[in-house]
Image (cartoon, grey):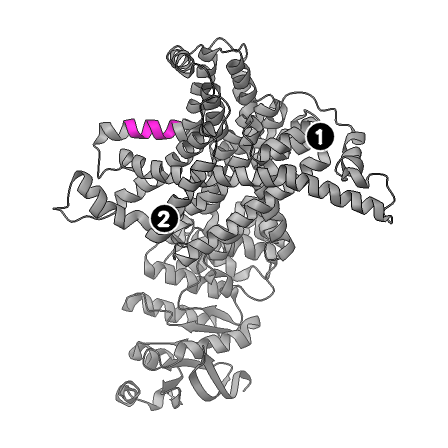
């Protein structure tokens, strides 16, 4: 384990030399002071209909996650078919924001775009988790069923009840993720929190931005109070009505998207039996690969590796903050408060804030990714460390940390970290939309030039990269015998 | 007499190890069989072989009970009859138990002393009550024959008799793996003893004594 860790740390240092981490803003300190002032003077009246912003954010999250969960559940029943598994791996390898950018081309700025952008990747991930949960569930009751029992009754009586709690917990965890996704979708123009946050930031109105963020934290922290099983039916009925207007979807746009937009430019309307067409197509592939895909992949991988190690370092530093073994109740509640805020803030928003402070380079992205993911893993490890049994005369302070705790939980830590690797890479790609030259940057540029064929090519490259990292991470976990330990991460509730 | 269960010259293995060798059994309708022998002798294997062969028309109480802990006693008992009823009726019962089905299941549960627990989740019951729930399910499954693997193991003497009474009156033919020799002698018509991977003893219950059976338990 230490060899692997050492290799990753060394790799991250090498990447750090190749990466651009300069601060390019002229006066980051003044800006930081203004932001700090905004945080302590939140202005809840600045956005005229701030309540509706939150309601819409919840509505998008609810509709998207509900659709994704139902779709995922149906797909989980077919998950033993290879093509279904591959399709799920593909849709979940593409970030919600990329899906939103794709659906924007088809449906425009309509609620359907936002809902599908969440529903599709969530269906992919839910299908996988539900299928695995059902597979690991107790099968003994199935064996006593008499032959001739219909499939549906057998499933609902003998298989589902045993795993229902896990599925429910996982789905409610997904809903929390959905709230973050929904908020971030505002950055591409949908009327959720992110839209108003971006407006507030770009106008330098930090009191307004602070108010929005504070309400967002309250919303996530109070999730258990208002997301009750009994209310879900009611939400399902009303949520679609709170998605905002703009339902006019033009079939011609959808048709154009599939028949013209995504067809590579050299092939559009050309004779497909001509050698010339295909040689132009080869040039097109070569051009996108060399000029966009390769630099994008390099930047994405560099950033991911640095952020991964940064996440690990921060998680190791932060987990004692919430551990009963290290801090008393007062210290722990401060630790909890800090970790909740950092992990509730989507990486995208953190990166956006740091970008305002330090200007475009990899630094804001690295710090944002490391903070957010470090807080998530730190939280899980803190709870895990509480379970560790120590002898009564155990060492204290640094010695407790170094000799007793770390050796015991390091395997768990690596399992969490490698699980998070793919998530970090997916986020890294998407941060390109903010101007950092990862794959997302090239995708966003291609879309703004209305070269959708290029964007689709790059999105597929991004998905392939993610799937590759996922496979690599699984190999490493298996090599280190970590796979079982990481299961907990799927059910963090 | 009609033949109810039959195996002829068969070997049964589990993961490459032979557990039972050269087994031939004929069981007639109306017989009450006790399978006895040391733990690991192959009783469970024999029961599960018979279950696999005759699943279509035989009630079954497995050793692990096969209950769903998050469902109520009513639902677990009702699971014995899922194959008889329509999907719609099954689904309705899952959400909102029908009075007609409660009326069918209530007396069976009462007979086994769990009538008051009908709408308690099985996971909240004691081991003995869970075992009796599985017995009720087998009775509700119905039919003329029942296979059981240690169906009284989690209950005291009194409750064990309640279970044995219920099984022997509900089913014409029963084949039960038992570890309680006295109970086996009292309730069965025929004893089959298993030792060293094969049938070592097969006699009428009234022609065998407790000491005869002890030979099955010495190496």
Separation (CA) of disc 2 from disc 1: 43 Å
Residue furthest toward the left?
Answer: A393
Mark 1, residue position? A105
Tell which of A119 and A288 is nearer to you: A288
Tell which of A254 and B90 is nearer to you: A254
Q: Which residues are magenta?
A: A334-341
Tell which of B218 and A334 is nearer to you: A334
Q: Earlier in the sequence, mark 2 or mark 1?
A: 2
* Residue A5 numbered tag: 2
Quarter occupied by the C terminus of chain A? top left
**Location of residue A347 in the rendering, given as x and y in whole percent from the top left corner:** 47, 30
* Residue A3 numbered tag: none
- Within 10 angstroms of label 1, few (less than 14), some, or many (20 or more) residues? some
Residue at position x 44%, y 54% from top? A476
**Location of residue A47 in the rendering, given as x and y in whole percent from the top left corner:** 52, 11
**Location of residue A275 in the rendering, given as x and y in whole percent from the top left corner:** 84, 49
- Within 10 angstroms of label 2, few (less than 14), some, or many (20 or more) residues? few
**Location of residue B12 in the rendering, given as x and y in whole percent from the top left corner:** 47, 82
Image mark 1: chain: A
Is residue A67 highlighted in magenta?
no
Where residue A117 sits, quadrant-wise, is top right
Magenta stretch, main secondary structure class: helix
């Amino acid at each position: 384990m230490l060899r692997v860790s050492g290799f990753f740390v060394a790799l991250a240092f090498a990447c750090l030399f190749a990466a651009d981490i300069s601060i390019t803003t002229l006066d980051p300190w003044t800006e930081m002071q203004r932001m700090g002032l905004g945080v302590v003077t939140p202005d809840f009246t600045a956005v005229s209909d701030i309540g509706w912003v939150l309601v819409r954010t919840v509505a998008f999250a609810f509709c998207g996650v509900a659709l994704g969960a139902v779709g995922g559940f149906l797909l989980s029943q077919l998950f033993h078919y290879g093509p279904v598994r591959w399709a799920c791996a593909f849709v979940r390898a593409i970030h919600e924001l990329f899906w939103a950018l794709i659906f924007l081309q088809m449906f425009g700025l309509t609620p359907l775009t936002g809902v599908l952008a969440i529903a599709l990747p969530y269906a992919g991930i839910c299908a996988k988790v539900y299928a695995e949960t059902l597979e690991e569930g107790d099968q003994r009751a199935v064996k006593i069923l008499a032959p001739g029992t219909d499939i549906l009754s057998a499933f609902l009586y003998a298989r589902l009840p045993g795993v229902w709690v896990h599925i429910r917990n996982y789905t409610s965890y997904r809903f929390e993720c959905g709230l973050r996704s929904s908020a971030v979708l505002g950055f591409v123009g949908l009327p959720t929190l992110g839209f108003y946050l971006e407006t507030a930031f770009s106008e330098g109105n930090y009191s307004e931005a602070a108010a929005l963020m504070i309400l967002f934290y309250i919303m996530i922290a109070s999730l258990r109070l208002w997301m009750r099983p009994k209310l879900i039916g009611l939400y399902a009925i009303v949520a679609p009505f709170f998605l905002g207007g703009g339902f006019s979807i033009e079939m011609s746009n959808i048709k154009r998207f599939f028949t013209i937009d995504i067809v590579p430019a050299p092939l559009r309307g050309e004779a497909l039996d001509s050698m010339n067409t295909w040689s132009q197509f080869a040039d097109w592939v070569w051009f996108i690969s060399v000029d966009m895909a390769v630099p994008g992949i390099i930047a994405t991988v560099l950033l991911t590796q640095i952020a991964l190690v940064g996440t690990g370092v921060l998680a190791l530093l932060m987990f004692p903050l919430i551990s009963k073994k290290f801090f008393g109740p007062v210290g722990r509640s401060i630790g909890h408060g800090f970790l909740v805020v950092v992990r509730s803030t989507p990486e995208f928003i953190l990166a956006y804030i740091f970008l305002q402070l330090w200007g475009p380079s990899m630094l804001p992205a690295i710090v944002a990714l490391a903070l957010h993911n470090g807080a998530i893993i730190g939280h899980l490890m803190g709870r895990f460390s509480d379970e560790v049994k120590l002898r009564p005369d155990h060492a204290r302070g640094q010695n407790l940390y170094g000799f007793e705790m770390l050796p015991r939980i390091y395997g768990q830590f690596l399992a969490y970290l490698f699980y998070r690797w793919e998530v970090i890479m997916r986020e890294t790609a998407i941060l390109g939309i903010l101007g950092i030259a990862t794959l997302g940057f090239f995708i966003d540029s291609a879309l703004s030039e209305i070269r959708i064929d290029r964007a689709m090519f790059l999105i597929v490259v991004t998905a392939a990269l993610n799937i590759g990292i996922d496979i690599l991470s699984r190999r490493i976990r298996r090599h280190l015998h970590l796979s079982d330990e990481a299961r907990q991460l799927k059910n963090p509730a | 007499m009609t033949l109810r269960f039959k195996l002829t010259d068969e070997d049964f293995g589990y993961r490459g190890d032979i557990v039972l060798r050269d087994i031939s059994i004929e069981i007639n309708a109306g017989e009450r069989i006790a399978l006895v022998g040391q733990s690991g002798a192959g009783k469970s294997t024999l029961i599960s072989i018979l279950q696999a062969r005759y699943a279509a028309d035989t009630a079954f109480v497995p050793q692990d009970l096969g209950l769903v802990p998050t469902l109520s006693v009513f639902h677990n008992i009702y699971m014995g009859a899922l194959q008889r009823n329509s999907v719609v009726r099954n689904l309705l019962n899952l959400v909102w138990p029908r009075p007609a089905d409660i009326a069918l299941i209530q007396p069976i549960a009462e007979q086994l002393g769990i009538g008051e627990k009908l709408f308690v989740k099985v996971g909240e019951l004691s081991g003995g009550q869970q075992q009796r729930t599985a017995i009720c399910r087998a009775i509700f499954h119905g039919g003329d024959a029942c296979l059981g693997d240690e169906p009284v193991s989690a209950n005291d003497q009194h409750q064990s008799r309640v279970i044995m009474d219920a099984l022997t009156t509900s089913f014409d033919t029963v084949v039960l793996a038992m570890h309680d020799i006295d109970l086996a002698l009292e309730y069965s018509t025929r004893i089959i003893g298993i030792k060293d991977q094969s049938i070592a003893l097969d006699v009428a219950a009234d022609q065998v004594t407790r000491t005869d059976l002890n030979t099955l338990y010495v190496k």
